[in-house]
């Protein structure tokens, strides 16, 4: 015998309708979530690399500097430069090792490092 909606008691019709809507909503939510998740995973670029540079200043008299020091990194396809400064710290003093951490372009294999300063300050070195 085929059951038609009029043959189902009222309390069973409501339950059936609720379950059907919940199933449809869950399936729709899953489909949308899966679609957005796949799209997000494809669009997310890898994080840029972090570079750590340590510079040891010599111990001889007047080997430190008050000038603005710049580093340039040259890689297999890209290069970039950055002024090195730790805020609140007197960088590049005699016998000290200063460490700098920064995020930059993915340079590939770093082939050259250039270090220089602009000859400014009270004791440019």
Image (tube, rainbow, N blue to C red):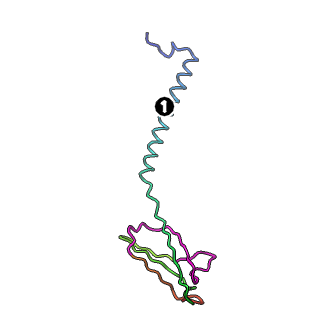
The image quadrant where one finds the C terminus is bottom right
Badge 1 element: helix
Residue in the picture at 45% in, 39% down: 31
| Along the line of sight, the residue nearer the viewer: 91 or 15 | 91
Magenta region, main secondary structure: loop
Residue in the picture at 44% in, 43% down: 35
Q: Residues within 10 Å of mark 1 (few under 14, many from 20)?
A: few
Residue 122, quarter of picture: bottom right
Please provide percent x and percent y for residue 48: 46, 63
The image quadrant where one finds the N terminus is top left
Residue 73, quarter of picture: bottom left
Please provide percent x and percent y for residue 98: 56, 76
| Along the line of sight, the residue nearer the viewer: 5 or 29 | 29
Please provide percent x and percent y for residue 14: 56, 21
* 89 falls in the magenta region: yes
Please provide percent x and percent y for residue 118: 51, 86
Above or below for 36 versus 56: above
The residue stretch that appears in magenta: 83-111
Residue 76, quarter of picture: bottom left
Residue sitting farthest toward the right: 88
Residue that mark 1 sits on = 24
Number of numbered discs overlaid on the protein picture: 1
Residue in the picture at 43% in, 46% down: 38
Above or below for 16 versus 52: above
Above or below for 26 versus 111: above
């Amino acid at each position: 015998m085929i059951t038609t909606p009029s043959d189902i008691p009222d309390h069973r019709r409501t339950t059936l309708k609720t379950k059907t809507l919940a199933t449809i909503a869950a399936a729709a939510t899953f489909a949308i979530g899966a679609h957005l998740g796949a799209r997000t995973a494809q669009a997310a670029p890898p994080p840029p690399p972090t570079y750590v540079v340590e510079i040891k200043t010599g111990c001889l008299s007047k080997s430190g500097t008050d000038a603005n020091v710049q580093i340039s990194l040259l890689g297999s396809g890209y290069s970039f430069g950055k002024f090195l400064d730790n805020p609140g710290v007197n960088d590049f003093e005699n016998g000290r090792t200063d460490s700098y951490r920064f995020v930059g372009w993915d340079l590939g294999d770093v082939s050259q490092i250039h270090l220089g300063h602009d000859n400014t300050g009270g004791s440019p070195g």
